[in-house]
Amino acid sequence: MDIQEQRLLAAVIRNHCWAALATQGAEGPEASWVACAAAPDFSFFLLHLSRLAAHTRNLLQDPRASLALSEREREGQDPQSLARVMMQGRAEVIPRQHPDYAAAVQRYQERLPASVLLFEFDDFLLFRFVPTQARFVGGFARIRTLDAAALRQTAAV
């Protein structure tokens, strides 16, 4: 990846907190929309999910998941030209008693201030999605596959 592609990928991750989450349901793959907060080094993404949602129940049964983010569409722009990234990995609950929980909550709430009240509800769980691979599309014929280390390196640009 050249430096321009790295900057574009980093911008997609840093500037967007609304992502498509794909999980494995009882009848097959299911996709939904979730809010997320990336770690500064892109090593993980935080998801605060209600047990009432199918995607949460799916993750509790099978932590394998995909998370996808995209540039925002602009009027008159061909959506095929949008920069986007799809990451595969695992999402696991961070228990409230875990030493990382407080810092993760703070990170999530800084990124998504409206979420503060949701942390008072017992049905919500905080997940850490750890990507193992990412597929970045920077536009037409600009496709790159990155492992977790290369994704973390992108955060440094």
Image (spheres, rainbow, N blue to C red):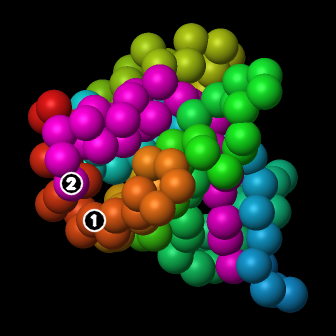
Quarter of the figure with residue 106: top left
The local crowd at label 1, few if under 14, some if 14 to 19, many if 20 or more residues have their Cα within 10 Å, is: some
Query: On the rendered structure, is 27 left or right of 2?
Result: right
Residue 124 shows in this picture: no
Residue 118: % across, % down: 68, 25
Say which label, 2 or 1, has the lower sequence index: 2
Is residue 21 within the magenta segment?
yes
Q: What is the CA distance from the residue labelled 2 to the residue labelled 1? A: 9 Å
Secondary structure of residue under mark 1? strand
Residue 20 shows in this picture: yes
User: Looking at the image, which residue sits at the far bottom?
Assistant: 27
Residue in the picture at 56% in, 12% down: 113
Query: On the rendered structure, is 65 left or right of 51?
Result: left
The local crowd at label 2, few if under 14, some if 14 to 19, many if 20 or more residues have their Cα within 10 Å, is: some
Look at the image and give the residue range highlighted in magenta: 1-24
Asked if marks 2 and 1 touch (Cβ < 8 Å), the reply is yes
Instruction: Tell me the residue that label 1 is attached to.
Output: 146
Residue in the picture at 66% in, 51% down: 80
Front of the two marks 2 and 1:
2
Secondary structure of residue under mark 2? loop
Residue in the picture at 55% in, 69% down: 65
Instruction: Tell me the residue that label 2 is attached to.
Output: 1
Residue 84: % across, % down: 52, 48
> Where is the N terminus found, in terms of image quarters?
bottom left
Task: Give the amino acid type for the residue marked by disc 1 in the picture.
Answer: Leu
Residue 67: % across, % down: 55, 57
Give whichever of 88, 130 is nearer the camera. Answer: 88
Residue 86: % across, % down: 51, 59
Task: Give the amino acid type for the residue marked by disc 2 in the picture.
Answer: Met
Is residue 76 within the magenta segment?
no
Label annotation for residue 50: none
